[in-house]
């Protein structure tokens, strides 16, 4: 199934890994944020990669 929702839980360290992997979905301000209005299904592989690469495991998604 394709990803329908993406969020970041508390504990983000703003390391930038998620933005480096998928800047169309993730944006680093003070902390990492998810960009609204994105068709997450188009970035399914990169979102999964960002979640797996997150050093503090705070990137979550649902299908």
Image (tube, rainbow, N blue to C red):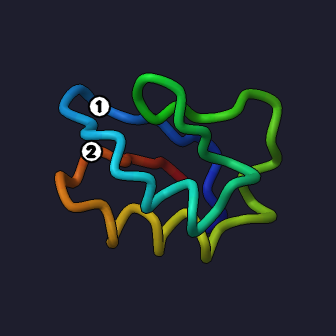
**Residue 49: x %, y % from top left:** 47, 74
Mark 2 neighbour density, 10 Å: few (under 14) some (14–19) many (20 or more): some
User: Is residue 50 placed above or below 15 in the rendered structure?
Assistant: below
Task: Decide which of 25, 5 is in the foreground and name it.
Answer: 25
Q: On the rendered structure, is 34 left or right of 60?
A: right
> Is the C terminus in the top left, top right, bottom left or bottom right quadrant?
bottom right
User: Is residue 18 placed above or below 49 in the rendered structure?
Assistant: above
Residue 9 is tagged as 1
Q: Earlier in the sequence, mark 2 or mark 1?
A: 1
**Residue 10: x %, y % from top left:** 23, 26
Task: Decide which of 13, 42 is in the foreground and name it.
Answer: 13
Dividing the picture into quarters, in which one does residue 3 lie?
bottom right
Q: Which element is circle 1 on?
A: loop
* C-alpha gap between disc 2 and disc 1: 5 Å
The reply to whether the C-beta atoms of the residues labelled 2 and 1 are less than 8 Å apart is yes
User: Is residue 43 placed above or below 62 in the rendered structure?
Assistant: below
User: Is residue 47 placed above or below 32 in the rendered structure?
Assistant: below
Q: Which residue is mark 2?
A: 58
Q: On the rendered structure, is 40 left or right of 57?
A: right
**Residue 25: x %, y % from top left:** 68, 48
Q: Which element is circle 2 on?
A: loop
Q: On the rendered structure, is 62 left or right of 58?
A: right
Residue 41 is tagged as none
Dividing the picture into quarters, in which one does residue 22 lie?
bottom right
> Is the N terminus in the top left, top right, bottom left or bottom right quadrant?
bottom right
Look at 33% across and 71% down and name the residue there: 52
Look at 61% across and 76% down and name the residue there: 45
Mark 1 neighbour density, 10 Å: few (under 14) some (14–19) many (20 or more): few
Task: Decide which of 44, 53 is in the foreground and name it.
Answer: 53
**Residue 14: x %, y % from top left:** 35, 41
- Looking at the rendered structure, the number of numbered marks drawn on it comes to 2
């Amino acid at each position: 199934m394709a990803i329908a929702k993406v969020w970041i839980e508390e504990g983000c360290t703003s390391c930038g890994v998620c933005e480096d992997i998928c800047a169309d979905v993730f944006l680093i301000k003070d902390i990492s944020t998810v960009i609204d209005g994105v068709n997450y299904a188009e970035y399914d592989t990169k979102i999964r990669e960002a979640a797996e690469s997150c050093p503090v495991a705070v990137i979550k998604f649902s299908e």
